[in-house]
Image (spheres, rainbow, N blue to C red):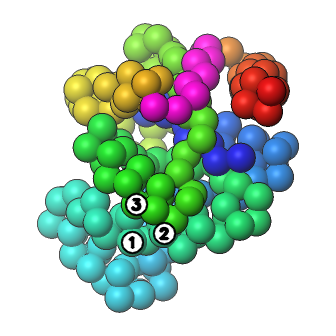
């Protein structure tokens, strides 16, 4: 099974990705974790990534895709993956799909963790990790999400199976809900 988690900052994607990977025997792949590991390990890719990050620029899509290729292929061969953190835009999703389709490892089911804005702001303020976690910065991050990432929900609804879950509930309930819906989708696909 190949899954993608979609949700606003603070929706619980990282938490659910880890839980679902453990529960379903899948590999959790976090693009952010992989980028940070490449930088720490000072790989060729990591050095290039660090230059972009130091300048405050986004890491180019092709670099992220190149970085994800091996882990996604390996995870697919080992039974599947839960992808968290990429793609972030419809354009990235289209590029990623074309690349993954060629390799036979495209996302099968997208999971949207739906959380109201007020709750997202509350969560992000509560977990504040630094000086950039102010109300204004959080509001800006959510506006960027609305403009760039939210359109992916419709994109994945048209192309793959899309599961929408109320991500505002306690983490255990969200995991349970996703698992139940995944079982329903799996039964439909196998029928």
Badges 1 and 2: C-beta atoms under 8 Å apart? yes
Q: Is residue 15 above or below residue 81?
A: above
Residue that badge 2 annotates:
69
Is 161 contained in the magenta span?
A: yes
Identity of the residue drawn at 51% across and 16% down: 115
Can residue 92 be seen here? yes
The residue carrying pointer 3 sits among few (fewer than 14), some (14 to 19) or many (20 or more) residues within 10 Å by Cα, namely some
Give the extent of the magenta segment: 159-168
**Residue found at x 26% / y 33%:** 148
| Left or right: 170 as drawn, with respect to 151 | right
Residue under label 3: 99
Where does residue 157 sit, x and y in percent of width and height? Answer: 47, 23
Residue 27 screen position, x and y as percent: 70, 58
Q: Nearer the viewer, residue 52 or 1?
A: 1
Which of pointers 3 and 2 lies earlier in the amino acid sequence?
A: 2
Question: Is residue 131 toward the left or the right of residue 77 in the image?
Answer: left
* Front-lying residue, 61 or 135: 61
Task: Report if the CB atoms under discs 1 and 3 are less than 8 Å apart.
Answer: no
Q: Which mark is residue 117?
A: none
Q: Residues within 10 Å of mark 1 (few under 14, many from 20)?
A: few
């Amino acid at each position: 099974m190949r899954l993608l988690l979609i949700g606003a900052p603070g929706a619980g994607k990282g938490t659910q990705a880890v839980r679902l990977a453990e529960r379903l025997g899948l590999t959790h792949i976090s693009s952010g974790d992989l980028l940070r590991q490449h930088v720490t390990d000072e790989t060729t890719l990591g050095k290039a990534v660090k230059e972009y990050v130091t300048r405050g620029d986004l890491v180019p899509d092709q670099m992220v895709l190149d970085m994800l290729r091996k882990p996604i292929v390996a995870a697919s061969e080992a039974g599947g993956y839960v992808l968290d953190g990429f793609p972030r835009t419809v354009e990235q999703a289209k590029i990623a799909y074309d690349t993954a389709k060629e390799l036979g490892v495209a996302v099968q089911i997208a999971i949207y963790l739906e959380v109201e804005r007020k709750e997202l702001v509350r969560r992000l303020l509560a977990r504040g990790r630094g000086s950039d976690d102010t109300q204004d910065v959080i509001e800006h991050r959510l506006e960027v999400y609305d403009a760039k990432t939210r359109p992916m929900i419709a994109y994945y609804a048209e192309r793959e199976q899309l599961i929408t879950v109320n991500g505002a509930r306690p983490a255990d309930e969200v995991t349970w809900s996703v698992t139940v819906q995944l079982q329903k989708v799996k039964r439909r696909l196998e029928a």
